[in-house]
Amino acid sequence: MHLVSFDIFRTLGFPNTTVVKPDQFLRHKALLREADWVLFPEYWQLNALVHGLKCRVFPSIASYRIGHDKIEMTRAFQTVAPEHTPWTWIEANGPVEREMIWDTMTHPFVAKLPKASMGEGVWLIETRADWRRYCECTDVLYAQEYLPLDRDARIVVIGDRVLTAYWRTQADQGFYNNVARGGRIDSSPVPKVMTDLALRLARELEVDHAGFDIALVEGYPYVLEFNRLFGNQGLGQGTDMQGAILGYLRRQTEPRDPDGPVDPRPLWPVAV
């Protein structure tokens, strides 16, 4: 299995892998056409690689396109798992829409920018001044119900299995659970109902490399978002990212026996 990677750090130590700089990909068209898989291209390369050079890319096309925009992501969640998606209102940013959302939402509520990560571009809206400041920063209004949480779970899915799952507790300033914003990692077991939801979403949406953020409210799981390129702060000593990725790529490359056994077990122990 010959691989071409555009991310030297995420594929460090991968066997039989050629690393190419993203901005030089047009110089290596023959190499890319012959590769079994092309790993971690930039988003702007996707159409050229998939439709122009007919490359098989990892992460999947869905991982890129759904994970690129919170609005598209939320609509995908609402399509396949509306019962596990917080109530969300998405509108064009106009004066009528601003007032309609402000008057309708239960306060406080959460507002987000369509494209942001690591806790950036997320507001807790408590006052009209908060709402006004948010509205001045975005073309599209994204308002979501506030869930009373002191933690959420990061569930990492590689391929068709859960690689690891851990809790992220709230930062000292409150509201944010993101490790990049001061949240802390808790390695207590994550309930199976949460990991099952992450795996269900990944399979139905054809997402094969993602860190899903899932909240638990009175025992019921809600999906907040996923990150295609997630941080490694919470990946423990038992995590074998390289082995998980290579194993998945091999399974996708090799012909499958439809009558053969299927191993549904996650790679990481989870709470029942």
Image: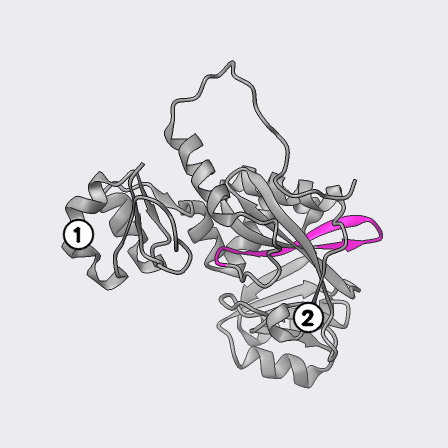
Residue closest to the eye, 88 or 77: 77
Q: Establish if 222 lies above or below 22.
A: above
> What label does residue 169 carry, if any?
none
In the figure, residue 267 lies in which quadrant?
Answer: top right
In the figure, residue 95 lies in which quadrant?
Answer: bottom right
Label 2: few (<14), some (14–19) or many (≥20) C-alpha neighbours in 10 Å: many
Position of residue 10 measured from the top left corner of the image (x, y, whole percent): 42, 57
Q: Establish if 229 lies above or below 191.
A: below
Q: Is residue 37 left or right of residue 81?
A: left
Q: Is residue 259 left or right of residue 11?
A: right
Q: Which residue type carries mark 2?
A: Gly
Q: Establish if 150 lies above or below 49.
A: below
- Magenta residues, as a range? 215-229
Residue plotted at (69% across, 68% down): 177
Report whether residue 132 is seen.
Answer: yes
- Looking at the image, tell me whether mark 2 or mark 1 is earlier in sequence order: 1
Position of residue 118 measured from the top left corner of the image (x, y, whole percent): 56, 69
Residue closest to the eye, 209 or 235: 235
Residue closest to the eye, 46 or 241: 241
Q: Is residue 184 left or right of residue 45?
A: right
Residue plotted at (70% across, 68% down): 184
Name the secondary structure under disc 1.
Answer: helix
Q: Which residue type carries mark 1?
A: His
Position of residue 210 measured from the top left corner of the image (x, y, whole percent): 53, 51
Q: Establish if 123 lies above or below 270.
A: below
Q: Quadrant of the C terminus?
A: top right
Question: Residue most toward the right?
Answer: 218
Residue plotted at (48% across, 58% down): 229
Residue picked out by circle 2: 183
Residue picked out by circle 1: 28
Q: Is residue 74 magenta?
A: no
Q: Quadrant of the N terminus?
A: top left
